Amino acid sequence: MDSARVDRALRQYELALREWYLGGEWLALSHLWIASENLTKAVIRKVCADQGVSEEDLAHAYDVVTDDPKKPHWSDLLGARIRKAAIFEGDTGTYNTAKEASDGLEHGFLEFNKITANAVKCADKTFRYIRKTILSLLGLPEDIVTELLDIPPRDVQSDRKVIRGRLVGVAEDPADENSLYPLLEWNSAIESITREGEKFVHNAKERITVKTHPDVRFHMDRLELVGRLEAGEATRQFSDEDVAFEEFKTPSGPKLMDRAQVLIDGSLSAIGEAGYSLPGLLAFQLFGQGVASFQSARVLVGALQPVEALPSLRTLTLTAARFEQTAATDGPGLGLVLRMNLEWLEALGADQELVDERRREIVDAAERVGVTPAEVLPDPKDTVVYRSLGAEMAMAEGVTDGTYGALAQHLSTAAEGQTSFRVQLEPDSFTNLVSSAAVIAAMTLLRHARELLGWDIDGDAVDGLLVEASVLNEDAAKP
């Protein structure tokens, strides 16, 4: 056996199998023709060995002249005749069609549609001829050869699912407000696989999410499966149980965050270049930290990562809690912010003389405007805003502590029991829970900063958005 040539032919056969899909027949045929060329010399040598003749004797048997000086390349002519007679088993139509397609592609004299038409006409038969020739050269037992010949090439790529339908409704723009076009998000899942002899049958479940304007819906007319049918195979039909439709509703939480950002931006522009004493400046810096935390949470929610937004939400809530304590009528006022700053200085671990010097500067500057540092820092968890977001704060602590409970929202279990990890989460009630909590904390922060620092901003708008966020938060928390 000419193992090197057979090996090359097997590699070409494998490549042809990879290209065996609707529209790829011409590529498959190209590899099959190369395989036939690789096998030709091996077949000639096998025939000569089996018949005990030389190649020249074999050429004479196929009416090939070997002693004409004007035609010195008689072996090439013998190869072509052996290829047609032995490999293609004398099937002149298939041989000529395949050869024309291969030559037309290689030398560029055929239009592509003609090459494709030839390939569609003869590729399946050529597959069998090449497979049969390889098996004959391998010298396998007859029963194995018979079994392998009965297995046709599998087209595993051509299945195409097509949904046809209409958009029904009236709207200036039929798309969802966050999309440029109406969308159908199509997810296919394999629920089970069964083997029937040499065939594997998979049962799929289709989940189609419709994303359109609230006043526009999608009416499905039919669902089609397009692909290559094998001999005797029935056309597959979809049943109602195979398809699940769901209407996508854009969560309200991210929209509330957008509105909250507008109010925050407006408050900052209204503040302008207002001057502050040292205690007021420290409070304003703390407010800035809260705003940065809100913006961080907003970006992560927009990136479909509300779980990762929880630590920023916790920082924002703690900042809002400090402002709630500072603005309380019986509270320490700006003295609480001074105490926070002083404790931060002590925790730095810097040279004690420098720390003492800086402490005196802060205390002296505060006393000049009648502000005394609070004796102790009250627990921020005792505030209204922190208690109202207790569940969110517990989840945030789980995320920052790296507990396994923080992963729960990322885990998804399919019908067959397989669990997967989702980095991004589709917007749902959890998105509303996190985003509404962020708006509650941000509006609480803004309201108390307005009271504490005397800002001229629209308090009714702040309170109104706070009420909306609280209603949404309660609704999102329901099981």
Image (tube, helix red, strand yellow):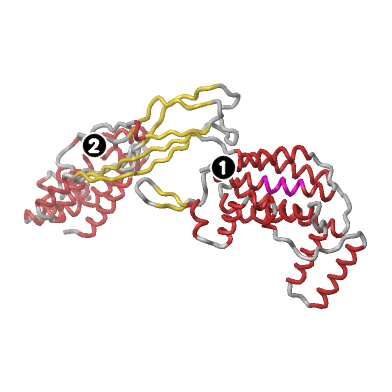
- Give the numbered dot on residue 230: 2
Image quadrant holding the N terminus, namely: bottom left
By secondary structure, the bulk of the magenta-drawn segment is best described as helix
Is 117 situated left or right of 407 in this image? left
Span shown in magenta: 439-447
At mark 2, the secondary structure is loop
> Is residue 58 located in the magenta-colored stretch of the structure?
no
- Viewer-side residue, 448 vs 110: 448
Which residue is the extreme one toward the right? 368
- Viewer-side residue, 268 vs 63: 268
Residue under numbered circle 1: 476
Q: Which residue is painted at 32% across and 35% down in the image?
A: 227
- Viewer-side residue, 85 vs 270: 270
Q: Position of residue 275 (x, y in %)?
A: 89, 53
Number of other residues with Cα within 10 Å of mark 2, as a class: few under 14, some 14 to 19, many 20 or more: few
Is 238 situated left or right of 318 in this image? left
Q: Position of residue 404 (x, y in %)?
A: 49, 60
> Which is more N-terminal, label 1 or label 2?
2
Q: Amino acid at mark 2?
A: Glu
Separation of residues labelled 2 and 1 (CA atoms) = 51 Å
Q: Is residue 53 visible?
A: yes
Q: Amino acid at mark 1?
A: Ala
Q: Which residue is painted at 16% across and 52% down in the image?
A: 135
Number of other residues with Cα within 10 Å of mark 1, as a class: few under 14, some 14 to 19, many 20 or more: some
Q: Which residue is painted at 24% across and 32% down in the image?
A: 234
Vertical relation: 147 (above or below) 369: above
At mark 1, the secondary structure is helix
| Labels in figure, total | 2
